Image (cartoon, helix red, strand yellow):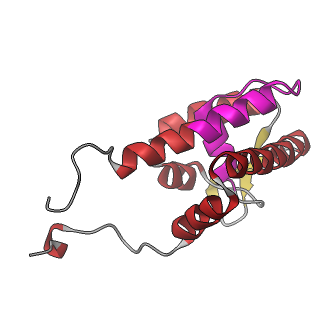
Amino acid sequence: MTGVRRDRRDLPQLLGEARRWFEEGLLAEVGGDGGPAVTPPQVQLFAQLDEEGTTVAELARRMGVTRQTVHQAVHALVAAGLLEQVPDPSSARQRLIRRTAEGRRAHERARRALERLEERLADRIGAAAVAALRSALESAWGEPPTCSDKRP
């Protein structure tokens, strides 16, 4: 790998650490507001839901995990009163997972907490750096490269 410094960490590792920073900050904020305790995978699942509901299979695809993992997280969030399962109007065999009224309130609290975390990050690394990071992450990256995409 020409041109890559050996003394710096890989970008995927840095992105993972950044994600954990937000997850830990979010869990600390929502855990302190008296709501039900949730895990990072449950937070990720909650964020992947469409307003009208999402199937377990689609949630698993979006999260890059197995359906079993999603079922476990859904079960815990249903038990906590944050999610519900309803019939899918487009398929008699499937059910949609969607937020309950309490789940919608929790989702709104989480969104406000994420806004505060982003403000704290801007205080630490600068608003321009946060704006550049957001811009880069919102850019269309296209499909992951394949072995036929190798550079000479």
Give left or right: position of 67 versus 86: left
On the rendered image, what quadrant is the N terminus found in?
Answer: bottom left
The spot of residue 53 in percent (x, y) is 72, 56
Which residue is painted at 48% across and 54% down in the image?
61
The spot of residue 134 in percent (x, y) is 60, 64
Q: What secondary structure is the stretch in magenta mostly built from?
A: helix
**Residue 150 seen by the camera:** yes
- On the image, which quarter does residue 133 sit in? bottom right
- On the image, which quarter does residue 35 sit in? top right
On the rendered image, what quadrant is the C terminus found in?
Answer: bottom left
The spot of residue 81 in percent (x, y) is 83, 32
Which residue is painted at 83% across and 24% down in the image?
32
The magenta segment is: 21-49
Q: Is residue 38 magenta?
A: yes
Above/below status of 84 relative to 119: above
The spot of residue 24 in percent (x, y) is 64, 31
Give left or right: position of 101 versus 3: right
Above/below status of 53 relative to 83: below
Total marks shown come to 0
